[in-house]
Image: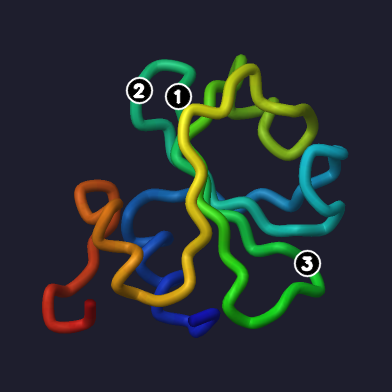
């Protein structure tokens, strides 16, 4: 699952890549973040040194975009472990995924 397609989709969907420097998730993990409502963010997290199928998705509240990767979220509203591209269908309105690739 940790192939390059998902990261191309995230970039095309307006997600920013942030290297985690905080303690909430593994230091050095990559966080792909997009604000979906005021102070509410959709995150896809690549855990550093994890198994190839370990991508985590969150909907969280942060004080600001600058807080992501430094501090814990104010609130976690949703969490899902992404194991295959079919799991991404839950997020299709935020991603630009070609229908024939899901």
In the image: residue 51, left or right of residue 4: right
**Residue identifier under label 3:** 48
Q: Farthest residue toward the left? A: 99
**Residue 41, image x and y in percent?**
47, 32
Residue located 87% across and 39% down the image: 23
As helix, strand or loop, the secondary structure at mark 1 comes to strand
Figure check: 42 above or below 32 = above
**Residue identifier under label 1:** 40
Towards the viewer: 34 or 42:
42
In the image: residue 73, left or right of residue 43: right
**Residue 55, image x and y in percent?**
57, 65
In the image: residue 47, left or right of residue 39: right
Label 2: few (<14), some (14–19) or many (≥20) C-alpha neighbours in 10 Å: few
In the image: residue 88, left or right of residue 74: left
Residue located 32% across and 54% down the image: 13
**Residue identifier under label 2:** 37
Q: Earlier in the sequence, mark 1 or mark 3?
A: 1
Q: CA distance from mark 1 to mark 3?
A: 24 Å
Label 1: few (<14), some (14–19) or many (≥20) C-alpha neighbours in 10 Å: many
């Amino acid at each position: 699952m940790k192939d390059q397609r998902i990261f191309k989709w995230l970039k095309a969907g307006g997600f920013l890549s942030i290297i985690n420097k905080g303690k909430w998730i593994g230091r050095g993990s990559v966080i792909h973040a997009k604000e979906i409502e005021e102070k509410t963010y959709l995150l896809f997290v690549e855990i550093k040194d994890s198994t190839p199928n370990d991508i985590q998705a969150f909907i969280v509240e942060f004080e600001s975009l600058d807080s992501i990767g430094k501090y814990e979220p104010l609130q976690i509203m949703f969490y899902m472990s992404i194991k295959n591209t079919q799991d991404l269908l839950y997020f299709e309105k935020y991603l630009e995924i070609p229908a024939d690739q899901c």
